[in-house]
Image: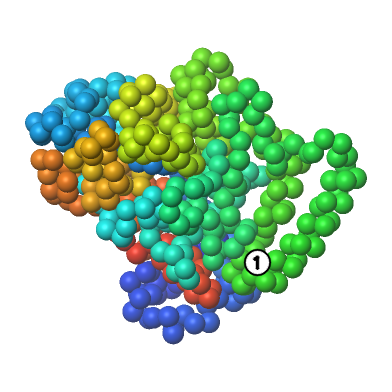
Amino acid sequence: MLHIGNERVPACSGLDRRSFMHVGAAGMAGLTLPNLLSLEQAGAVEYDKSKIKNCITLFLVGSPGHIDTFDMKPEAPDDIRGKFKPIQTNLEGVHLCEHFPLLARKMDKVAMIRSMHHNTGTAHSNGSRWQMTGRDAIGANQQPHVGSVVSRVFGPKGNLPSSIVLPGKIGNTGGPSINGQEARYLGSAYEPFFLNGDPARSDFKVADLVPAQGQNEFRISARRELLKQIDSVQRRAETSTTIQRDSAYSRAFNLLTSTEAKTAFDLDKEPDKLRDRYGRNTLGQSALLARRLIERGSRYVTVNHFDTVFNICCWDMHANGTSLNNTYLDYERLLCPQLDQAFTALIEDLEERGLFEDTVVTILSEFGRTPKLNARGGRDHYPPAWTNFICGGNIKGGQVIGSTDRIGAAPHDRPIKPDQLIASIYQGMGIDLETTMMPGPGSRPIRLIEAEPIHELF
């Protein structure tokens, strides 16, 4: 069975990706979405919202120094090893930074990949595109966000959007503004839903769920009709691959009128003790909200830990004394404790609710940071080496994959690129990359990602 979009195409010859590549694009030239929809109406294609697992990604915008957190080098020279001390985890011989005591006791649940690397540029946006799409591409080759791919291929499970980004879209990080969190050629119907609100605030509300003050049902209905007309114009402007059973506008009204959606976003329904366990900060409450959304029908939730790197406390530890002045003190007092608390609370919460095996959880970041401290005691951007985490779903936890050399400058063994990790997320969600395809530019079926998954994870 070959899956293309939401469709399952029977293939009596056992067509899979390898067979497809042998046949070539010319042999499939007629297999566009309109053709598939016609086949479905004729009974040749079964419409199926497949039962796949979910995913929650914690994306650390700015990127922590791997040597200061997850890949410590206590025997390295002073100007490399940094200020923090390692602690033993519950995996023999595996150490983390002293400011991750909770994670140290959960390492039997997670897989830690210490040999991440890429070589396409040192800007935050380079790493973000890699980690959000599986490819660092701009211009005409821009790729859709993984959540948009999942939404396009498998569709919604209810009134909630399939793909949601919390608390907001990545903004200014100093380079090109293309950060990989858009649907791109898949079309507006598969754009992630951006919360654009801080769930840690006492006055937190989701704008799309609350009518503007003074708007009665008549005005809402009138607005619906206006947006339908706008939607019609947009649909004529987009390609046939984007004209599906949903649109950005109809989705917004589904949210506005859905009691289920409003309940999903209501953190006040969670016990205070659990909210405290996650941490009463933006990352912690976003992680808790992500669990609520997955539990109620969303498929893919991305939590951005920060939406910029300027003039805030974040992972971008340049220590430059001006707009990028994050230091070891920020890591010690705020950043490491927040991540330690939120990540481990999410694992525990999912386990207690029986959702851990149904949900892939990842910690991703754009790159590592320079092995050698800069003159100000900070570390700068460094794509040749860093560490990420993955657990839940079909993933085998309790292991470390890859390593770096004695100063954390480059992978020592088992180098892993971001697209391999994205392929592993898909497989961890139960998606068969050999038989599941999606409409690419021009409506031609393409593989979700060309890279192969990390085999040690399965």
List x then y, in percent, for residue 409: 17, 46
Q: Amino acid at mark 1?
A: Ile
Where is residue 362 drawn, in percent x and y? 38, 40
Q: Taking 230 as reference, is 216 left or right?
A: right
Q: State the residue lying farthest toward the right.
A: 218
Quick check: 90 above or below 319? above
Asked which quadrant contains residue 246, the reply is: bottom right
Q: Nearer the viewer, residue 412 or 177?
A: 177
Judging by the rendered image, the residue that carries numbered circle 1 is: 243
Q: Position of residue 255 (x, y in %)?
A: 70, 43
The residue under the point 56% across, 17% down is 271
- Residue at 15% over, 34% down: 79
- Residue 157 visible to an observer of this rendering: no
Can residue 409 be seen here? The reply is: yes
Left or right of residue 206: residue 176: left
Judged from the image, the secondary structure of the residue bearing numbered disc 1 is: loop
Q: As displayed, is residue 265 above or below residue 271?
A: below
Q: Residue at x 49, y 74 (%)?
A: 444
Residues 11 and 354: in front is 354
The residue carrying pointer 1 sits among few (fewer than 14), some (14 to 19) or many (20 or more) residues within 10 Å by Cα, namely: some
Please state, as top left, top right, bottom left or bottom right, where the N terminus lies in the image. bottom left
Q: Is residue 311 above or below residue 47?
A: above
